[in-house]
């Protein structure tokens, strides 16, 4: 086992640091200057069927659900098709409507999660086109779906998913580029994202240099009982996923929150002790996040702000927040960058608090029972 971990102490740590490489393999042979080529969707004109869908339904559990949520704004923008999010178990509990005119995307690292597979059976019975996004070639998910895209992130061993998350987002972005490739009005936008994808592994290498800074931040949070993470837009999913990482491995209560909902409840929790991470990197929501920060500061909130490089004084003019500066990339790819400091934070918090990083209490890598 130690040989497989190489110079790392834990699989989770190794998998976090592997992301420049795993993202490269996810994109290998698929991202060209002229567009995106996804062999798994080419056959039988699947792309055309997806384009004609009345709705796209994204289905998954845990981190895989969060990856789909991160991709949702961009998929809607580039395809013009509405996206509905479904946690697999909730779709089953409600027996929610799925139609023949829907395309259902099933996102699962293992391809063996029981709830996701049951939701797949349900969508197949209801006549939807079913697309699998998985890391596991030959898995039940990849065999039972009509078509799909493998994320090719390499084997993930740590129970807490890290590199699969970023590769899942990139695959969903590639799917959006492929489905939207017939639209002339978005051509310039698509081209900008394609060049953003090519630079992404080097941007990820850069953000990984925050490792020591995240370890220091973790040591300042080691005794906290709770941690909130506020995000919105492209980075609502980052808030959910960052909080999930902290909760599942560091065994610290943590909640990801939609910043737009702050006034409708979470604001009551704010005081000088509760640490709050606010994600405020540059995108169309930036000024709204600046105002969230001001409102939290006026209630004496203990803030840690994630912002784009060079924006420290723009997000926190008073200098009273702790700031994490990350490289700025195309807005829809920013969630891939922004989750990495939070993965590092969760990792270091876990080690410092003395918990098992790769086998968190009560959790399994793949939940194959309902
Ligand atoms: C478990 C794992 C999570 C994972 C989730 C979904 O809860 O601990 O890391 O995100 O299952 O797994 P899947 O294989 O379907 O992505």
Image (cartoon, rainbow, N blue to C red):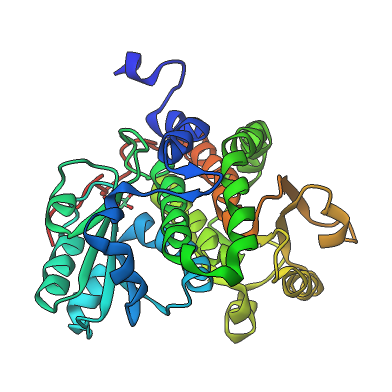
Relative side of 206 to 173, left or right:
right
Q: Position of residue 39 (x, y in %)?
A: 31, 47
Q: Position of residue 83 (x, y in %)?
A: 40, 76
Q: Quadrant of residue 222?
A: top right
- Count of marks, rendered view: 0
Q: Is residue 365 above or below residue 247?
A: above
- Residue 39 against residue 236 in the figure, above or below: above
Residue ID at (42%, 57%): 172
Viewer-closest of 61 and 20? 20
Question: Residue 44: which quarter of the image?
Answer: bottom left
* Image position, residue 11 (x, y; %): 38, 30
Which image quadrant: the C terminus?
Answer: bottom left
Q: Residue at x 45, y 62 (%)?
A: 176
Apparent side of residue 110 relative to residue 57 in the rendered image (left or right): left
Q: Is residue 332 above or below residue 86?
A: above
Placement of the N terminus among the 4 image quadrants:
top left
- Please tell me which residue lies in front, 176 or 225: 176
User: Is residue 266 in view from this perspective?
Assistant: yes
Above-or-below relation of 215 to 49: above
Q: State the image coordinates of residue 33 (x, y, percent, origin top left).
A: 56, 44
Residue at 52% across, 33% down: 20
Residue at left offset 65%, top offset 61% = 188
Q: Is residue 274 visible?
A: no
Name the side, left or right, on which 30 lies relative to 100. Answer: right
């Amino acid at each position: 086992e130690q040989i497989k971990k190489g110079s790392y102490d834990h699989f989770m740590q190794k998998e976090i640091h592997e992301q420049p490489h795993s993202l490269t393999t996810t994109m290998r042979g698929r991202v060209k200057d002229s567009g995106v080529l996804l062999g798994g969707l080419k056959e039988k004109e699947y792309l055309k069927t997806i384009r004609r869908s009345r709705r796209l339904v994204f289905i998954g559990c845990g981190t895989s659900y969060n990856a789909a949520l991160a991709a949702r704004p961009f998929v809607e923008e580039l395809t013009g098709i509405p996206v509905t999010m479904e946690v697999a178990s909730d779709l089953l509990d409600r027996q929610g409507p799925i139609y023949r005119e829907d395309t259902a995307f099933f996102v699962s690292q293992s391809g063996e999660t029981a709830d996701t597979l049951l939701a797949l059976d349900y969508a197949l019975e209801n006549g939807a086109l079913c697309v699998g996004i998985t890391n596991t070639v030959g898995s039940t998910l990849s065999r039972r779906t009509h078509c799909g895209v493998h994320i090719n992130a390499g084997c993930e061993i740590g129970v807490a998913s890290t590199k699969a998350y970023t590769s899942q987002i990139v695959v969903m972005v590639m799917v959006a580029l492929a489905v939207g490739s017939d639209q002339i009005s978005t051509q310039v936008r698509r081209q900008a994202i394609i060049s953003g994808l090519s630079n992404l592994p080097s941007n990820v290498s850069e953000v990984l240099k925050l490792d020591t800074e995240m370890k220091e931040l973790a040591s300042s949070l080691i005794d906290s009982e709770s941690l909130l993470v506020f995000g919105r837009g492209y980075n609502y999913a980052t808030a959910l996923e960052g909080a999930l990482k902290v909760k599942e491995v560091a065994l610290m209560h943590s909640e990801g929150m939609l910043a737009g909902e702050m006034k409708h409840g979470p604001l009551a929790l704010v005081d000088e002790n509760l640490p709050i991470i606010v994600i405020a990197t540059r995108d169309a929501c930036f000024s709204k996040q600046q105002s969230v920060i001001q409102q939290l500061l006026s209630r004496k909130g203990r803030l840690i702000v994630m912002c784009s490089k060079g924006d420290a004084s723009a997000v926190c003019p008073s200098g009273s927040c702790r700031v994490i500066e990350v490289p700025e990339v195309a807005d829809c790819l920013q969630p891939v960058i922004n989750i990495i400091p939070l993965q590092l934070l969760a990792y270091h918090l876990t080690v410092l608090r003395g918990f098992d990083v790769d086998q968190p209490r009560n959790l399994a890598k793949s939940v194959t029972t309902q």
